[in-house]
Amino acid sequence: EEWLQKSKTKPNGKKPPAEEKKQYLEPEFTKIRVVDFDLKELVVLPREIDLNEWLASNTTTFFNLINLQYSTISEFCTGDTCQAMTAYNTIYYWYDERGKKTKCTAPQYVDFVMSLCQKLVTDEEIFPTKYGKEFPNSFESLVKKICRYLFHVLAHLYWAHFKETVALDLQGHLNTLYAHFIVFVREFNLVDPKETCIMDDLSEILCTPAPPPASTPAPSTPASAPSPSSQNHVTER
């Protein structure tokens, strides 16, 4: 898929806010999780389970949980508030089955994502539930497609709707879901790191088990903070 770096502004003409605006990176929020153990143990393929069965089961669960998490803020994600599907300096476009590129609002994009995922995970030919039924050859590529789209939804939740998530006191659920999802897709190489790099600063904090309270304050600026010039362009996906 193409990466285009055309516009230097967001769809509404404003430049992306500077790095310090990432409220979701503040320690008071990142320390809030629903569980406090190593998520890696949750995602490793159990010895007696078929890989495709494991991918199918986890992908379906993540689809349901991310759909549920989005539904908690969906009333705030409208065509007016989110005129494009954005996350940090990236605008996501929807590509239909014929590869036609469509610019749509965030709620339209999420609706496309959830409808496609629902269609795939409930299709017996793709996600078979009956014993002895084979998975199709295209199974892994479809799982990768679902996971890539679900990542876009998670990134948009953090970037556009973190304040509402905090207001609903659901940031612990979002953090835990995000960390579990990232550890899972990394374990099975399901999403290209080029796709997830826009959230690497958060991933590094959340995907390690929560540290014990530290006596030294955390540095205020992440070491990997983009240079000012990189904040002023918008990547189109």
Image (tube, rainbow, N blue to C red):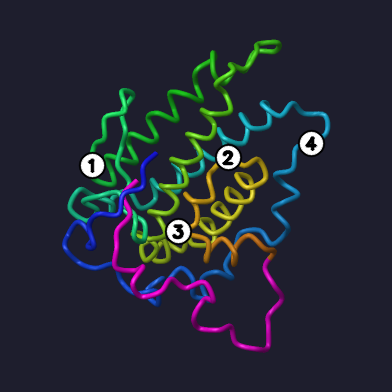
Residue extending furthest bottom? Answer: 216
Residue in the image at 34% along x and 46% along y: 237
| Real-space CA distance between mark 4 and mark 2, rounded to the nearest whole angstrom | 18 Å
Residue in the image at 54% along x and 59% along y: 175
Give the residue pinned by disc 4.
46
| Real-space CA distance between mark 2 and mark 3, rounded to the nearest whole angstrom | 16 Å
| Real-space CA distance between mark 4 and mark 3, rounded to the nearest whole angstrom | 31 Å
Mark closer to the observer (3, 1): 3
Which residue type carries mark 3?
Answer: Ile
Q: Residues within 10 Å of mark 3 (few under 14, many from 20)?
A: some
Determine whether 68 is above or below 199 in the image.
Answer: above
Does label 2 or label 3 sit earlier along the sequence?
2
Q: Residues within 10 Å of mark 1 (few under 14, many from 20)?
A: some
Residue 71 lies, in percent from the top left, at 38, 46
Does label 4 or label 3 sit earlier along the sequence?
4
Give the residue pinned by disc 1.
104
Q: Which residues are magenta?
A: 210-237
Tell me, yes or no, whether the two marked residues, 2 and 1, touch with CB atoms within 8 Å: no
Which residue type carries mark 1?
Answer: Cys
Give the residue pinned by disc 2.
190
- Of residues 50 and 227, the one nearer the viewer is 227
Mark closer to the observer (4, 2): 2
Q: Secondary structure at mark 1?
A: loop
| Real-space CA distance between mark 3 and mark 1, rounded to the nearest whole angstrom | 21 Å
The mark found on residue 37 in the picture is: none
Predominant secondary structure, magenta span? loop
Which residue type carries mark 2?
Answer: Leu
Tell me, yes or no, whether the two marked residues, 2 and 3, touch with CB atoms within 8 Å: no
Determine whether 115 is above or below 194 in the image.
Answer: above
The mark found on residue 198 in the picture is: 3
